[in-house]
Structure formats: C-alpha cells, structure tokens
Image (cartoon, rainbow, N blue to C red):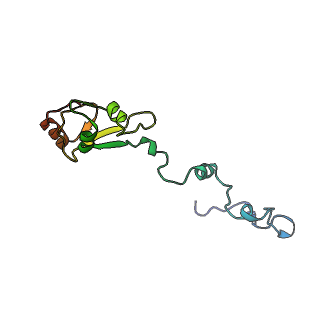
Amino acid sequence: MNTLKRNTERKTSRQRGRGGKRGKTSGRGTKGMLARAGYKRRPEMRDIIKRLPKLRGYAFNSFQKHVSTISLDLIEKHFKSGAEVSPATLLSAGLIEKLGGNFPRIKILSDGDITKKVSVSGVAISATAKAKIEKAGGSVRA
C-alpha cells in the first residue's frame, strides 16, 4: 500500500484572495464586517438578549414574599382588650397595606409588652410574642 502512486497529476489548489477584477476586494465585493474572514451576521439570539432589560432579577421581584411585621407595641396601642387580631382588623387599623389586592404575609414580633387580652388568628407569630400574649390572657390560633 505504501508504494502506490497516482495515475494522474494533482490539480493545483485553488488560490484564495484572487477573485474579482484586479483583486481589489478579492471577490467579497464589500467593505467592513462582510469583507472579514469568518464573518457572521448578528445572530438572532443576540438581538433577543439585547432587548431584555439590563437590571438583574427584574422578573423575579414579583415572586418575593413580602412580609409585614407587627410589634406587640402596635397591637397594644391600636386594639382594645378582647379584640380579634387578624389580617382584616390589622388592615382596618391602618397597620398593613394590601399588595396587589391581596393581604401580605404578616408576622407578629415580640417588640414591647402587651397587657390587653387579644385573640390572634390568621397570622404568623414568633414564639416569644405568643408567650407574651398568652401570659396577658390572650389566645393564639394558627
């Protein structure tokens, strides 16, 4: 196999950069990006990416869970003894605002002291706040 020879001579390889009249544009016929080696027109995917906003995380702000925190001081100040503390009563007291027409997640924290007997329902509550409310004679329902 290593002694085989061709019957016909090899044709000369095609020369590059010789096209067109007088070799001016080497057959590319244009200037700029289109005349360069390995050029590609701008890919469609890049156009899509360039149209997107640059701020990172812009699409995910709406998925974050907004939590409104209420301290025991505010409950002591705005509610009477024997009152019900729920998202609706907190809204009517002006302590929370609706987000997009819905109640936000609410958590009661143990800042301050409470002496009034209140019943809490429909909100998240810290362990120390729950202990303070029950010590004052109130009740906590999940």
Whole-percent x, y for residue 129 in the image: 19, 41
Q: Nearer the viewer, residue 13 or 67?
A: 67
Outermost residue on the left side: it is 135
Relative to 81, is 94 on the left or the right?
A: right
Q: Residue at x 14, y 35 (%)?
A: 134
Please identify the quarter of the rendering in which residue 81 is found: top left
Relative to 6, is 110 on the left or the right?
A: left
Whole-percent x, y for residue 77 in the image: 26, 41
Question: How many discs mark residues in the rendered view?
Answer: 0
Q: Residue at x 23, y 40 (%)?
A: 76
**Residue 9 showing in the rendered view:** no
Relative to 74, is 41 on the left or the right?
A: right
**Residue 132 showing in the rendered view:** yes
Q: Residue at x 19, y 36 (%)?
A: 116
Q: From the image, which quarter does the C terminus lie in?
A: top left
Q: Nearer the viewer, residue 60 or 44?
A: 60
Please identify the quarter of the rendering in which residue 119 is found: top left
Residue 31, placed above or below residue 141: below
Whole-percent x, y for residue 86 in the image: 29, 31
Residue 43, placed above or below residue 62: below
Please identify the quarter of the rendering in which residue 16 is found: bottom right
Q: From the image, which quarter does the N terminus lie in?
A: bottom right
Q: Nearer the viewer, residue 9 or 73?
A: 73
Q: Residue at x 69, y 64 (%)?
A: 37
Whole-percent x, y for residue 25 in the image: 80, 66
